[in-house]
Amino acid sequence: MGMPVLLEELKETVDPALEPILLMQTFVAGGRTLIRLGDSDIDYNKKFKFYMTTKMANPHYLPEVCIKVTIINFTVTKSGLEDQLLSDVVRLERPDLEEQRNQLIVRINADRNQLKAIEDRILKLLFNSKGNILDNEELVQTLQESKVTSEAIKHRLEEAEATELMINAARERYRPVATRGSVMYFVIASLSEIDPMYQFSLKYFKQSSVLEERLQILLDQTLLTSYTNVSRGLFEQHKTIYSFLLCVDIMRQRGEVSDAEWQHFLRGAHPLDKVVRLIDGPVSQSNGTIVRCQPIKGN
């Protein structure tokens, strides 16, 4: 009793039989807390938890469903995926660096927890102390020991945080690879909008001893391998779209194509009736495009 239950593969509609659980429609009978499921009354444990998950990328639930549950969106973001990929790349390329970072994080947290415990202990002794605190030998001794311990911990924290900065600086050199991987993932994920059958993943790398060469190989090989493998699963008419989306997203990530330029490409010129005439003569589609391009001319 009281064990959590997980319901997987939820669709956009919820079975009405789950209503009593979602609404927590419990009642007391004979000193027992019960809940009715179907035609049966069963004991209800307050520790019981009910979870539902869906693999749908963008589900649309009706308001009457939303008010009965707490919806948590675990959809990955570009920045979140980039950080995850950075850890994966560093763990593969420099396992010593990632292990050192993980140990450092554990050590820093342990030291901070110890500092907090010392502060709590001092506060508790002060709260329970009666009369002159200088006459309380246990308190005075605890304060002296705590001062020495706290200074040692603070010194360790300063050294650990300085080391953490150095490790993070070394890790950041691999960020271009993580950024490229994030860009490629979201381009490939968007292919399902062209055809629902397109579902892909990617994890491919090649070795080199020089870091600069290694990074370029990681960038090039990851792009080439994923492009080749994904293209094999696309219809011929969709391969050009995939290539174009990859190129544009990489250029946008590099700053070579601005958001304004991309939106202009997608949407084109303003409606002709809203175009301000910059030249004499009839307004044409070309005039509209020129006006639209004006704000991004300097990019």
Image: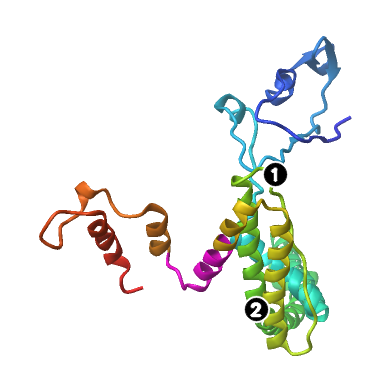
State left or right for residue 153 relative to residue 72.
Answer: right
Q: In this view, does 73 lie above or below 30?
A: below
Q: What residue type is labelled 1?
A: Met
Image: 200 above or below 102: above
Residue at disc 2, secondary structure:
helix
Quadrant in which the C terminus appears: bottom left
Q: Is residue 251 above or below residue 286?
A: below
Instruction: Please give the name of the residue rendered at 55% of the width and 27% of the height, measured from the top-left corner.
Output: 63
The boundaries of the magenta stretch are 245-258
* Badge number at residue 172: 2
Identify the residue at the far top of this view. Answer: 39
Which circle, 1 or 2, is nearer the viewer? 1
Residue 191 appears in view: yes
Whole-percent x, y for residue 14 in the image: 69, 25
Locate residue 81: give its quadrant. Answer: bottom right
Task: Give the percent coordinates (x, y) of residue 232.
Answer: 73, 57
Q: In which quarter of the image is the N terminus?
A: top right
Tell me the quarter of the picture where residue 72 sits: top right
Q: Residue furthest bottom?
A: 210
For disc 1, the marked residue is 197
Residue sitting at 47 percent across and 72 percent down?
255
